Image: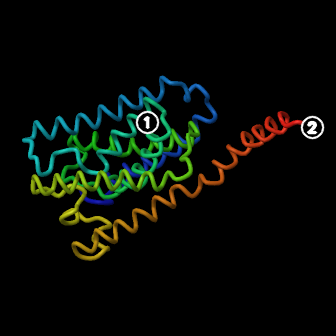
Amino acid sequence: MEHFALPHLTAIAITVVMAVAAAVVPRRIPALRRDLVPYLAAAVLGGAWLWVQIDNIADGFVASKDLPFQLSDWAVLVAVVALVTLRPIAVEMAWFWGLAGAIWAVLTPDTSRGFEHLNTWFFFVAHSGVIVAACYLVFGRRIVPRPGAAWRAATFSVVVFLVAAIADITTGGNYMFLREPPARGSLLDFMGPWPWYLLSAAVMALVVLVALEAPFRRSVKACLRPRLRAIDTAESDRRPA
């Protein structure tokens, strides 16, 4: 696929519109905050991801490139878990990996196929779906990242990095582009030669994670403040006069 050609720009525009709608509409239509909606979204997201894996196998599975060890794969799976369970830790990882990882898969898809191939459609449903799901959970359902979420995301990201590194060594692959940048171009092309672009990417990733947490620090404190006041009031009532 040619990057930023009309079909690609259309896919990006649809992703943006759906992400905004997922963040805003559930606040105005309470029915969209019911459990059935996230279950349906999880089914669509998980089904699209599974289709891509099945298509890879049917097309002639190659361990060096077809294992689900890219960061965007982990983002899709954790988004499915977040939609089904609504657990804060899963929502946090969907938020960080969706906006720091899957978004790059949408902007610079590493695929040679165009939209005439069904696999490409499912690729965008899966990766754009992570972004939409993250916006729905964080803004539509208001399950905001808790204090320290960026550092937890960084820790999990290191674990994923190590898994990808082991897979690269074992299979001779290029998972998470640890050996070389994508052949079709990406932001890594501007971060220096190998292996220095890995350090640049790590620093940039940490900055992005902290930036993605920053808008919620005040909102989390605002949510906790009434509870803290209630606790202080209860304790003062129990104190002897």
Which element is circle 2 on?
loop
**Nearer-the-camera pick, 105 or 65:** 65
Left-right relation of 26 to 221: left
**Distance from label 1 to label 2 (Cα)?**
48 Å
Residue 164, position as x, y percentages in the image: 22, 53
Horizontal relation, residue 237 to residue 25: left or right: right
Which circle marks residue 241 in the picture?
A: 2
Residue 129 placement, left or right of 119:
right
Residue at the far top in the pictured view: 36
Number of numbered callouts drawn: 2
Q: Quadrant of the N terminus?
A: bottom left
Residue 139 place in picture, x, y as percent: 57, 43
- Work out which residue is located at the far front of the displayed protein and give it: 240
Residue, disc 1: 82
In the picture, the disc for residue 38 is none
The residue sitting at 28% across, 43% down in the picture is 123
Q: Quarter of the image holding residue 188? A: bottom left
Q: Of tags 1 and 2, which is closer to the observer?
A: 2
C-beta proximity under 8 Å, tags 1 and 2: no
The quarter of the picture where the C terminus appears is: top right
Residue drawn at point x = 21 percent, y = 73 percent = 194
- Furthest-bottom residue in this view: 192
Amino acid type shown at disc 1: Ala
How far across and down, in percent of the image, does residue 59 sit? 9, 40
| Viewer-proximal residue among 59 and 98 | 98
SS of the residue under disc 1: helix
Q: Amino acid at mark 2?
A: Ala
Residue visible at 48% across and 35% down in the picture: 87
Please state the horizontal and vertical placement of residue 126, each as a whole percent of the image. 33, 41
**Is residue 39 depicted above or below 228 in this figure?**
above
Q: Residues within 10 Å of mark 1 (few under 14, many from 20)?
A: many
Closer to the N terminus: mark 1 or mark 2? 1
